[in-house]
Structure formats: structure tokens, C-alpha cells
Image (cartoon, rainbow, N blue to C red):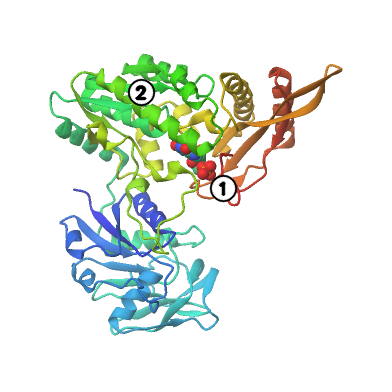
Amino acid sequence: MSDTIAILDFGSQYTQLIARRVREQKVFCRIYPCTVDPGDLALLSLKGVILSGGPASVYDEGAPTLDPRLLELGVPVLGICYGLQAIARHLGGGVERGEIGGEYGRAALRVEQEGRLLDGVSRTSQVWMSHGDQLTSLPEGFRTLASSESCPYAAVADPDRRIYGLQFHPEVTHSEHGTLVLRNFLGAICGCRGDWTMESFIDSAIRQIRDTVGEEGRVVLGLSGGVDSSAAALLLHEAIGDRLDAIFVDNGLLRKGEREEVERTFRERFQIRLHVVDAAEEFLSDLAGVEDPEVKRKRIGHRFIDVFKGEAERCEGAEFLAQGTLYPDVIESVSPTGGPSVTIKSHHNVGGLPAELGFVLVEPFRELFKDEVRRVGQLLGLPEVILKRHPFPGPGLAVRVLGEVTRERLDVLREADAIFREELRRAGWHDKTSQAFVVLLPVRTVGVQGDARTYGHACVVRAVTTEDFMTAEYATLPHDLLGRVASRITNEVRAINRVTYDVTSKPPGTIEWE
Ligand code: XMP
């Protein structure tokens, strides 16, 4: 069992970032809600606990508190921001609103005493602060390691009890030596070996899959052509060979060449048994006359389950269903507002195929982040085009043909989209954007082509950059590239006579138009 760090989530927007930083140090970690029973953490492999920040004030009604048993697990504890305040409050230190009402943004950290936590950190460096409250006095046994202009206790430690605290956020890249501080905590203080690599993950995942599936078991897998399901297909294939059946549903809403690429990659190159189900007719007839994007999503979702189920039933003896579910989908995070969040688009609240299908689930990536899955795929030989593929929504081009989806309009969009993506790659911009596509508008515009008046379709070219797809910025593509795209689309796709570029960020826009 790998060394494990438990991260307790007090509601910070940075909790997942802490986890990623820990894993970058090749140390395995899991995120738990701050209400977890500390008894559940007392594993042999537990090497340390990190308490995240959070939006509350320790004095707010119902604010999460520190379970004292966390300090008795016999492993070092690091409190970050709210995590530190919760520790201080419990141990009798003072916590109050800062003199100037908090500190947000960059601050200069002055090291007073390195200790093991700040070993190697320069005397002054930049850190990232984001707090309303702060410590006004230390609990007994603690000493100050560093301070900032408005925060006398920016880094503190009780080395005897192995309790540490940071008022700043080491997980944020603006904290100059943040990675070093975390590395000191994980290595010098917790004694983690840093041997959790994707190579070791693959070995143990293969063993686990074989244990679960047994000598004879058969597995079906829904392959979309995206990174997650593609990497899952290769991993499963390594583990159980031809007892894997991959199912790819052609819903008629795919981009140009997508189906062929999946066939080439998985059937020909990796020799995986691939079932391609051509269900375009069914999907398109479900979509006839539908304009509302949520209705489109629902109908597509239902039809997908139906088609998948039908094909899976043809895979005789399959009891297991493999899915590329990722860690961010399974983390039980603390909602700072305490209430359910609003549904913006229905897909954000659903994941995977429903349990009623009756399969036993195999989810080898349940503990991995996206970049880790990409690394797994790379190690297993997944081609670059798939590794670097932009995410593509399940309902596909149906949410990019605004208004009613017809075969003709899909064909028009497919051609325009292919041109845009081809030019983007050619100009070296594909990998600099996170998602890039064309949207077909339900309006017509007047144009003039070859001396004749036209009344054609208008389309939107959209390209964004983003880290997490929760917020995004429009990509600042060069004008000459945009000009080339517009000219090619209007020349090569007869039905389109106008091309526009979307310069909206998210928020207030979303990435997709529907
Ligand atoms: P929005 O448009 O909400 O999208 O900013 C955020 C990310 O989610 C993708 N997206 C979807 N993915 N089914 C999916 O599987 C959907 O219905 C869906 N709608 C949006 C979108 O492409 C972006 O990556």
C-alpha cells in the first residue's frame, strides 16, 4: 500500500489543487469531507493529514470545527488557512478578523525561523493569501516560522506534537516556494517515500482488474473516443485481453472522421474487439422538431442507454461494465453554501450509465485526476491525437446546431468544423486552446457570392482556454488565422455565407452555446 495523505476539505476552492500538488510529489492522497470520522483514517499507510482552507469564519454559526481525534492519529498535521484557524481555535490560540479586514492576493513572506517546514525557503518570498480571519496569538507549544506585513503568524509549528500551519496557500502557483513547503511537509516531516507513479498505478490497477473480473469474466466498455474511455480500454485490454468488448455508438452527431479514427486506433492498431453501432437514424428521429437543448440532451441520453444496452446484451456472458469515471466526479466536496447547486446544464449532474443496466462496475480511474489518466494513456501507447483531444460533449453536434437538428444542418456544421480544426492545427493553435469548435446558428444572413445575392447560414467560431472548464477565457487567435478560417468556410461550405468569432468568457457565457 502506498504512503497516503488524507486531505480534509473545509470547503476551499483549492482543495483539489492541494491534492494535485501532493500527487505531483508522487505521494498518493485522498480527499475527505471535513466531517469524516477520524477513525476511518487510521490506516497503516496514513502518513499525514492536511486540513484545507475554507470560506467560513471559525465564529460563523455552523462553521466546521476540528475533530480533536485528528490530532491523535499519530501522524503530522498541516492546517492551511481555515485549517490552521480551526487548529488554533481548538488549542486555545486567538483567531480574529485581520486589522485591515483580511488579506487577499500577493504578500511578502519573511522567514524568521526555517524549521523543517520552511527548509530552503528564501528569507523573503512571495506568497498568496486569501483570508478574512487570522491568528492573533499562538496556542501553547507553537512557535512562529514566518510572518507577512499584516499577518504575524503566516507559518507556525509545534514540532513536538508535529502540528504545522500556514496562513498562506502553498498550493497556488503564486506562492513562490509553495511546492517546496509542501515537499518539506510530505518528505521531511511525514516521511513519505514519493514512490507513487503512474507506472506503479498501472501495475496495481491491472492486478485489481484481474482480481475483480476473475479468470473467466467478460467486460463491456462504452468507448467514446475521448481520453478517459480510450485509456480505460487499453488498460482493460492489458488486464484481460480479448475478454473485453468495446462498444462505440455512432449517434450521427459526431465530428468529421471521428468514427474512422476510433476504428483505426482500437480495431486495427490495438486489436481490441470493437462493436460500432450505427444508430444515427434513431437519434435523428428522436431529435426531429426539438429545439430546446435540455430536451435534446434528455432524448440523446435515453437513446444512448437503449442502444448501448441492446449491443451489450449481444456480448454474451458479460457481467462487468468498465467506465472511465475520474476522481473529481466521485469526491464528496463540502458545499460552502450548504445547499444544492443550480443545474446550468443537465450533464453536469449525471455521470455514466445507470445502475439498472445490471452490470458490476469496473472503474479503474476512480482515484485519478485527468492529467494522471492522460499519463496512463501515454504509457499504454495511446496516440497523441487522442491524448491531446479537446473534450467533446456527449450530445455532440446536436448542441452545436442551434434550433432543430437535421441531417443537412449537421452536414453543414461538420464541414465547417473540420475546416476550423484543420486550420487551428496547421497554425499550431490546437494545443494552445482547451476547446475549439464551430456552432451553426438558426439565422440566415444576406451575402454576395460571385455577383449573386445569397441568403445563407451564419456560423460562430469558438475557441477557449481554461484549466478546469468551470471558467474559461476566449482564445486570442490571430486575425489572419481567423480570416483564413472564414474565407475557407464561406468558399468550401456553400450553405454558409457568414462567419463570426465569439469573444465571450465564461462566466457570463458558457463554453457551448446550448
Ligand atoms: P459549458 O458549456 O457548461 O461546458 O461551459 C463545460 C464543459 O462541458 C462540456 N459539455 C458537455 N459534456 N454532455 C457532456 O458530456 C453535455 O451535455 C455537455 N454540455 C457541455 C462542454 O463541451 C465543456 O467542455
**Residue sticking out furthest to the right:** 451
Mark 2 residue element: helix
Q: Is residue 249 left or right of residue 67?
A: right
Of residues 399 and 51, the one drawn nearer to the viewer in this rendering:
399
Tag 2 or tag 1, which sits nearer the N-term? 2
Counting from the top left corner in percent of width and height, residue 25 is at: 35, 52
Mark 1 residue element: loop
Counting from the top left corner in percent of width and height, residue 421 is at: 60, 28
Residue 43 versus residue 420 in the image, above or below: below
CA neighbours of label 1 inside 10 A, class few (<14), some (14 to 19), many (20+): many
Q: Residue at x 67, y 44 (%)?
A: 503
Of residues 502 and 200, the one drawn nearer to the viewer in this rendering:
502
Q: Residue at x 61, y 34 (%)?
A: 429
Counting from the top left corner in percent of width and height, residue 306 is at: 34, 26
- Res 307 label: 2
Occupied quadrant, residue 115 = bottom left
- Res 472 label: 1
Between marks 1 and 2, how big is the CA–CA gap? Answer: 34 Å
Tag 1–tag 2 contact (CB < 8 Å): no
Tell me the amino acid under the disc marked 1: Ala
Q: Is residue 138 left or right of residue 111?
A: left
Residue 129 versus residue 258 in the image, above or below: below
Residue 336 versus residue 417 in the image, above or below: below
